[in-house]
Image (spheres, rainbow, N blue to C red):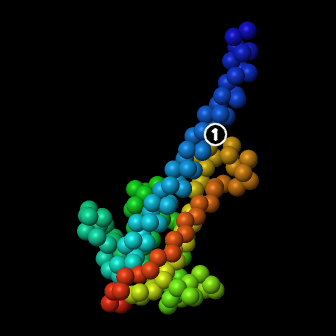
């Protein structure tokens, strides 16, 4: 009798626990991506090619160009939760002023001093439960997206 009751309860309970874990994992990924996008855009508006020393302390292979450092900052801001691989896409576009921003396509890159820049960051986070979640959602991951539009500070345009 006890084995029958356990069999009836264990399977739904297991799926509920897995669903809670998967939901928490994907919500944490979304929050981490939002945080990382904010950190990267705040760095990008300064115009500096090198990230702050407190971020690069103890790090190896730090990029020397601002556009490359934006992607690098996103990965570092999440302490590796977001991996720097093909699942991460960072698109930056710049416009000369507010009137053109968002309409059509801007110039590719993090922009120059005083320009309006959009940051579109997408990340495909794989499911932690693997095939179980994939069978419900029809894929191997959930796509997370963060979008920000900022105005660069009036910095001297440094080239990389």
* Number of numbered discs: 1
> Which quadrant of the structure image shows residue 39?
bottom left
- Give the residue drawn at x 35%, y 90%: 157
The reply, left or right, for residue 31 in relation to residue 68 is right
- Give the residue drawn at x 47%, y 76%: 150
Q: Horizontal and vertical percent for residue 5? A: 72, 15
Residue in front for this viewpoint, 112 or 160: 112
Outermost residue toward the front in this view: 99
Quadrant containing the N terminus is top right
- Give the residue drawn at x 55%, y 50%: 27
Above or below, 140 against 154 in this view is: above
Q: Horizontal and vertical percent for residue 136? A: 73, 47
Which residue is labeled 1 in the image?
19
Q: Horizontal and vertical percent for residue 18? A: 62, 37
Q: Residues within 10 Å of mark 1 (few under 14, many from 20)?
A: some
Residue in front for this viewpoint, 6 or 111: 111
Residue 134 seen in this snapshot = yes
> Which quadrant of the structure image shows residue 101?
bottom right
> Which quadrant of the structure image shows residue 160?
bottom left
Q: Horizontal and vertical percent for residue 119? A: 51, 74
The reply, left or right, for residue 126 in relation to residue 47 is right
SS for callout 1: helix
Residue 90 seen in this snapshot = no
Above or below, 11 against 40 in this view is: above
- Give the residue drawn at x 56%, y 88%: 99
Residue in front for this viewpoint, 112 or 73: 112
């Amino acid at each position: 009798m006890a084995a029958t009751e356990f069999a009836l309860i264990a399977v739904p309970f297991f799926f509920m626990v897995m669903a809670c874990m998967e939901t928490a994992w994907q919500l944490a990924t979304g929050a981490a991506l939002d945080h990382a996008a904010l950190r990267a855009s705040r760095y990008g508006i300064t115009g500096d090619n090198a990230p702050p020393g407190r971020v690069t302390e103890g790090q190896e292979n730090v990029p020397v160009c601002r556009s490359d450092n934006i992607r690098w900052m996103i990965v570092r801001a999440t302490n590796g939760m977001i991996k720097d691989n093909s699942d991460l896409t960072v698109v930056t576009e710049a416009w000369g002023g507010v009137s053109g921003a968002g309409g059509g396509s801007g110039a590719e890159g993090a922009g120059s001093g005083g320009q309006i820049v959009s940051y579109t960051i997408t990340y495909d986070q794989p499911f932690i439960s693997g095939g179980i979640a994939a069978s419900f959602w029809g894929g191997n991951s959930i796509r997370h997206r963060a979008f920000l539009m900022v105005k660069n500070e009036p910095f001297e345009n440094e080239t990389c």
